[in-house]
Image (cartoon, helix red, strand yellow):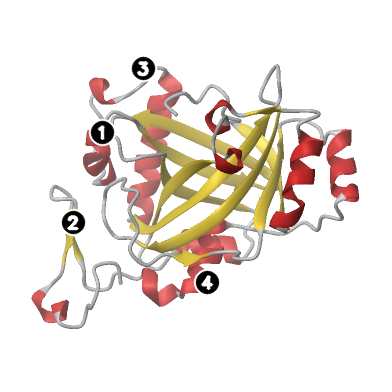
Amino acid sequence: MAQDHRLQLQRFELKYLVDEAITPWVRDFVSSYLDLDDFGVGRPNLSYPVHSLYLDSDDLQTFQYSINGAKNRFKLRLRYYDDSPKTPVFFEVKARVDNCILKQRCGVRREAVPLLLAGQLPQDEQLLSKEPRHLATLQRFNYLLHKLNARPKAHNTYLREAWVSRHDNSVRVTMDRNIVIEPCFVARAATAMSRPTRVFPESVVLELKFTTRFPNWFEELVRRFNLMQFAAAKYAEGVLLVGESRFHDGDRAFDWEGLAPRVHESTAASLPHAHE
């Protein structure tokens, strides 16, 4: 998962909720045009795990932008795929400008995560790539982090089946299963969850992604399976489902170096669980 050479930096996304029962037929259709992502080969449901740690302000501004349908909005998140100390964590800024998705992503070594989330910029050896665009991504992430006074708010995970175009990355189709979310106020990239809540429990999120024009066969796919477009934002839908109040950390203070939140003595008795 260390490579991001297939990342679509600018694209359009169309999302649909589909029943798991029809996904084998969707897969069969899509496989006529795209290749399975290497990370899904040999896995159950051809899917690999994806973890995201979403950052937001204490009043959940990026969540509010999403549910209010703001045309120009962004979200801050960390993306990672396992717990191994040897694998990277990707800092991402995902923005929407009108109907276009703009995605910036920079991989860093895992030990740098707490300091970066505390607002510091990395040392050269903490970056996976020395390309200027990656450092620019971290600088923009850092700017937005300070502008929002954003902190960890939610851990989201799911299993992703991904299909990609054979000669470039202009077209991509993904199916996300078993989507769960829970409040998380800890500045680290961990995979373990304690009390996750299922999001879209009866459905798989199908996403059609393209960088230039809408492929003709996308239109046939939508028609054949009678798909209805849906704004399936995992973070926003998860917060709505669990309840906004669960994602407000209240009087908690953060111990960035210790990777754990400190609870003020005045509120300790009223907090029954570390993630509530």
Q: Residue 238 in the image: x percent, y percent? A: 51, 65
Q: Please name the residue shown 46% across and 23% down the image.
A: 3
Q: Amino acid at mark 3?
A: Lys
Looking at the image, can residue 232 be seen? Answer: yes
Decide: is 81 above or below 241: above
Separation of disc 1 and disc 3 at Cα? 20 Å
Question: Closer to us: mark 3 or mark 4?
Answer: 4
- Circle 1 is placed at which residue position? 85
Specify which label sits upstream in the sequence, 4 or 2: 4
Q: Please name the residue shown 41% across and 28% down the image.
A: 136
> Do callouts 3 and 4 mark residues in contact (Cβ within 8 Å)?
no
Q: Is residue 114 left or right of residue 82?
A: left
Q: Quadrant of residue 137?
A: top left
Label number found at residue 130 = 3
Report helix, strand or loop for mark 1: loop
Specify which label sits upstream in the sequence, 4 or 1: 1
Query: Which of these two is toward me, 8 or 64?
Result: 8
Label number found at residue 8 = none
Specify which label sits upstream in the sequence, 3 or 4: 3
Q: Is residue 166 left or right of residue 134?
A: right
Q: Amino acid at mark 1?
A: Pro
Query: Which of these two is toward me, 179 or 236?
Result: 179
Q: Please name the residue shown 26% across and 26% down the image.
A: 126
Separation of disc 3 and disc 4 at Cα? 39 Å
Residue at the outermost bottom position: 270
- Circle 4 is placed at which residue position? 240
Number of numbered markers: 4
Query: Which of these two is toward me, 210 or 68?
Result: 210
- Circle 2 is placed at which residue position? 260
